[in-house]
Amino acid sequence: MIGHQVHSYFCLIADSPGRRRKEEATTPLGPQRSPQWLQRSVANTHLPSHIREWKLSGPPIIFLHGLGVDGTVWQAITRRYFAGCHVFALDLRGHGLSVHPPRPYRSQDFVDDAVATVRWIVQRHGTCTVIGHSLSAIVATGIAVQAADTVANVVLVDPPWAGPGPIIPYISDILESLPRGEQAVVEVVRRYQPELGELLSGVQARMWINTAPGVLETILIAPEDVFVLPTLLPGVLQPVLVLAADPSLDARISPDQAQHIIHTLPQVKVVTVVGSGHVIHAQKPKQFADAILDFLGIG
């Protein structure tokens, strides 16, 4: 069972790196072709953050990834379903191409970095919608509270209400394997996520390698410094959409906890995506996109 649970916790990569490189190298900017993703490091008052940007027009939406991956996990789904939006995908601190400090990796540190980057975006493009999956549902909530003037709407994708749950053994084994090199990490990924196959196991392993050990150590040693969603939620005043995974699978929020959110927030809609595990955008991408676009009133 642990393999199935972990499979749904982490994002399956719809675009392999080689496939992305080929497409971006051969697709010029132009009115009849899909634009390239623009990438930049945003200097701010906290750590510089790496962002990917696509479309350059339409309502701004900022996508925030979960633990152990990076902003590239949003590229396929946003190209397919969010063509009318100005998309930004941020790498959290300690992930992907953002800065990897030794410490700290509390939820407040992720939020502080993200707030600075969101302000940079909003100064140029106006108030935004923030979408956060899993760990980043906490980050998105913190942004909405700490920088309320920048956020018009919030989408929380299967937010982890009660902590890291079943992934602790996986995180521990990944952390132990990192000093032994890529093949050791691949073996751990295959053990916990056998359904990924050879190609995606390698992609996920490289994402783990590009995740700072301090991120994983903090979750193992002090999860109470990371998983603080119940504390943050009462401060959110913006309209909120909660996308919950199927409770019969590996949802990180239970129906009772979703009801608590409904009674806590002034403007909230909860949608349970039947048949989807934790990574809704990978397992049910059309339902994921339809629910968000309907919530935002984007046709």
Image (tube, rainbow, N blue to C red):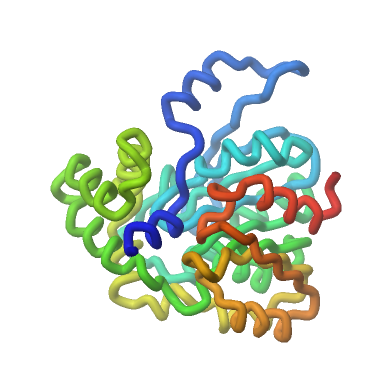
- What percent of the width, then of the height, locates residue 50? 51, 44
Residue 3 appears in the figure? yes
Q: Residue furthest left?
A: 180
Residue 255 falls in which quadrant of the image?
Answer: bottom right
- Judged left or right of residue 69, residue 51 is right
Q: Is residue 113 left or right of residue 291?
A: left
Q: Residue at x 40, y 71 (%)?
A: 164
Q: In the image, is 193 to the left or to the right of 37?
A: left
Place of residue 285 in the rendered image (x, y in percent of width and height, measured from the top left): 62, 46
The residue drawn where x is 16% and y is 50% is: 179
Residue 232 is situated, as x and y percent measured from the top left of the image, at 60, 79
- Quarter-wise, where is residue 159 in the image? bottom right
x%, y% of residue 223?
Answer: 38, 76
- Of 99 and 274, nearer the camera is 274
Q: Residue at x 78, y 61 (%)?
A: 152
257 or 238, nearer to the observer: 257
- Quarter in which the C terminus is drawn: top right
Residue at the (50%, 27%) spot, across then down: 20
Instruction: Work out whether 153 lies above or below 190.
Output: below
Instruction: Please indicate, yes or no, whether residue 113 appears anywhere in the rendered image.
Output: no
